[in-house]
Amino acid sequence: MLNIRRMLSVAAVFGVLLVPMAAVADDAKMIEEGKKISFDTKKGNCLACHMIMGGEMPGNIGPPLIAMKARFPDVAKLRAQIADSREMNPNTIMPPFGAHGILTDDEIDKVVAYIHTL
């Protein structure tokens, strides 16, 4: 059985990133919770304005939420867009989810985790 130190050495040599299984499970849970908030008509309600794969009756006011990693390689910019899009575009019609208290910081983080996977 390999010990942890040797595994880390091998991983460093080959450029492999070791991620604990608990972290992967936590990320998956956060993404799933973000999806629920995004689709919830009383919370994120992203489908009111955006097309999202798997969403029913999407809106077409906002852009389709696709290729989000390419559009927002910096997750902090995506978070800022969701929290208060007026910072980037003062004339936006997107609700300032954070500034108006529509979503909590924790909920915004979950929505960002989900949206960034699209």
Image (cartoon, rainbow, N blue to C red):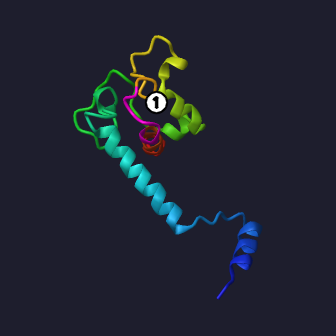
Residue type, numbered disc 1? Ile
Q: Position of residue 1 (x, y in %)?
A: 64, 88
- Magenta stretch encompasses residue 103: yes
Looking at the image, is 35 positioned above or below residue 13?
A: above
- Magenta stretch encompasses residue 9: no
* Residue in view at x 34 percent, y 41 percent: 37
Residue 84 shows in the view: yes
Image position of 87 (left or right of 38): right
Would you identify the image quadrant in which residue 6 lies? bottom right
Name the outermost residue toward the bottom. 1
Q: Nearer the viewer, residue 37 or 105?
A: 105
Q: For the image shown, how many numbered marks are present on the structure? A: 1
Image position of 49 (left or right of 105): left
* Residue in view at x 67 percent, y 65 percent: 16
Name the outermost residue toward the left. 57
Residue 53 shows in the view: no
Q: Position of residue 68 (x, y in %)?
A: 49, 37
Magenta residues (range): 101-107
Image position of 32 (left or right of 87): left
Q: Mark 1 highlights which residue? A: 82
Q: Residues within 10 Å of mark 1 (few under 14, many from 20)?
A: many
* Residue in view at x 69 percent, y 83 percent: 3
Q: Secondary structure at mark 1?
A: helix
* Residue in view at x 46 percent, y 30 percent: 82
Quadrant where the C terminus sits is top left
Q: Nearer the viewer, residue 72 or 81?
A: 81
Q: Position of residue 115 (x, y in %)?
A: 44, 40
